[in-house]
Image (cartoon, rainbow, N blue to C red):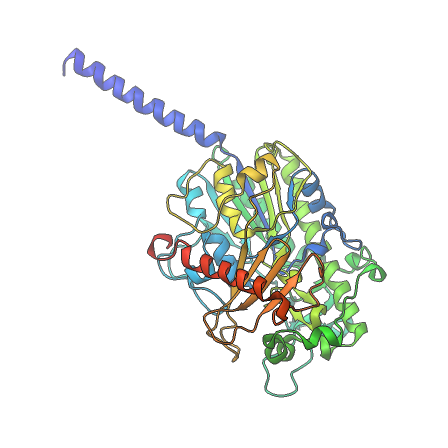
Amino acid sequence: MGILGQTRRRFLHQTALSLAASALAAQARRPNVLWLMTDEQRPDSLGCHGSRWASSPHLDRLAAGGVLFESAYTPSPVCVPCRCSLLTGNYGSTTGVLHNQQRLRAGTKFLTWAFEEAGYQTASFGKKHYFVDGRQAFQTEGGRVTEGIVEPEHYGKGYDAALHDALQYPDAPTKGVRRRWILGGQFPAPQGESAEAKNVDLALGWLEKRDPSRPFLLRLSLNAPHTPVVAPAEFLNVIDPDKIDLPLPGDEELAVAPDRERLLLRDFEGSQVLSKAEIRKARHYYYARAAFADAEIGRLLGRMRERGWLEDTIVVFTADHGTHLGDHGLFQKQTFYDQVATVPYIFWWRGLDRRGVRLRTPAGTISLLPTLLELAGIGAGWPVEGSSLAKSVLKGEEPPAGPVFSEIQFGYQGYRDHDRQVMVREGRWKMSQFIGTKAPDGALYDLAADPGETKNLFAVREHRDTVARLQSAISHWDRNRKLGEKTQ
């Protein structure tokens, strides 16, 4: 090889090294991402959402130094469809998962892969609750939902539920589908033996062993405050039960509730089978369990802060959906009332232009991974339905006003199993109904005049134009989303 050839070869080699170094430098500049997630957590379990009785100092600190969306809506008010939507950026009618018994299709693309392709180390510990044949969403997945000491419907071997103040949902009187959920009780072992604590331990262990030269995407996915609603005894003392609201429905509200609530959900998860004292007790344990989750999240954040791991880390906190605690005559979920459909949604990062910002415009949490990707300077490489809120997060500016959607099928409960329900929130109005059917069975609430959602206006003559306008919004959304093979 001549001198000219050798020079060219050295030039190409040096150019390749320079490009590789530039790529590594760009990768090193990318922020880490910590995704904190709980299950069935209502906004009123956090002090930063104005709750008078909540104890949530660690998450309140995130909100005080970050951006909080005051009206954030889940893409689905039930676990598996929501989690699949968050991981893919697509709605349930696109992913094919609209109730808890459905699985993602083979070949589904997870937005977490875009982080991996950009050089990130990815891991998730705790509740997974998505089902797919093939490649998983994170490179490393581990941890448990529960630890065997207390399960959703019973205490483990060697632990007597009666000795730990357990409150269980009663058996159905006939052949109904009601389950004996533990709605309250004390955790009978040291806090460190809980699934939540063990999952935090796993996350901390992974952080210690990761490659520090590469950025990370870490999800901590806690089951709390989901059933079993048990908390270490010390957390009962930080919640004053006398301060907790008890918004029980009156006969007038129940009379105008949608048929789906009266004909299915009242039997499946109605609060009428519990006394007022039992409902108070369940609510006390729920908020205590939420305080316990906050403490475990605080332990993770505290260790990360000590080690300097938060210096260039975007932190986002949300839940899959909320839950009923006697509100509207129900327990559990599967409705579009704000106690279920809205969730905490907090972003924290030292790179934010403004801190302590509260955004009032309704938004959807389906934006979570698209937002994180844009903040990290990464493109997904394929179209998704969730829109990024990165500008709102960075600048502390209200997102564009527009309709926000959520959807669900009951799926396997013997009541309109194949009919899809869709919710739309637009401005002061929120409407939900079965679509594609001659029996829409709808609900319409004016949240400005009736924030408690006690007056269903769907069948009220004076609101026909509002119903028609929101039905048109649903139809337009359903027709114009990026559906089909491109998103999978």
Say whether residue 199 is left or right of residue 299.
Answer: left
Q: Can residue 258 be seen in this view?
A: yes
Residue 266 location in percent, x, y? 65, 77
Left or right: 261 with respect to 118?
right
Q: Which of 73 and 280 is in front in this view?
A: 73
Vertical relation: 391 (above or below) 450? above
- Does 411 sit above or below residue 386? below
The residue depicted at 72 percent of the width and 78 percent of the height is 272
Residue 414 point in image, percent of width and height: 51, 80
Provide residue 257's location: percent of width, then percent of height: 65, 73
Foreground of the two, 405 or 57: 405
Does residue 129 appear in the picture of this structure? no
Q: Hey, which residue is sitting farthest bottom in the picture?
A: 174
Q: Image quarter for residue 424? A: bottom right
Image quarter (top left, top right, bottom left or bottom right) of the C terminus: bottom left
Residue situated furthest right in the rendering:
242
Seen in the picture, residue 91 relative to 440 is either above or below; the reply is above
* Position of residue 58 measured from the top left corner of the image (x, y, whole percent): 71, 45
Instruction: Say left or right for 35 vs 17.
Output: right
Farthest residue, direction left: 1
Q: Please tell me which residue lies in front, 393 or 233.
A: 393
User: Which quadrant would the N terminus be assigned to in this image?
Assistant: top left
Q: Residue 325 sits in which quadrant?
A: bottom right
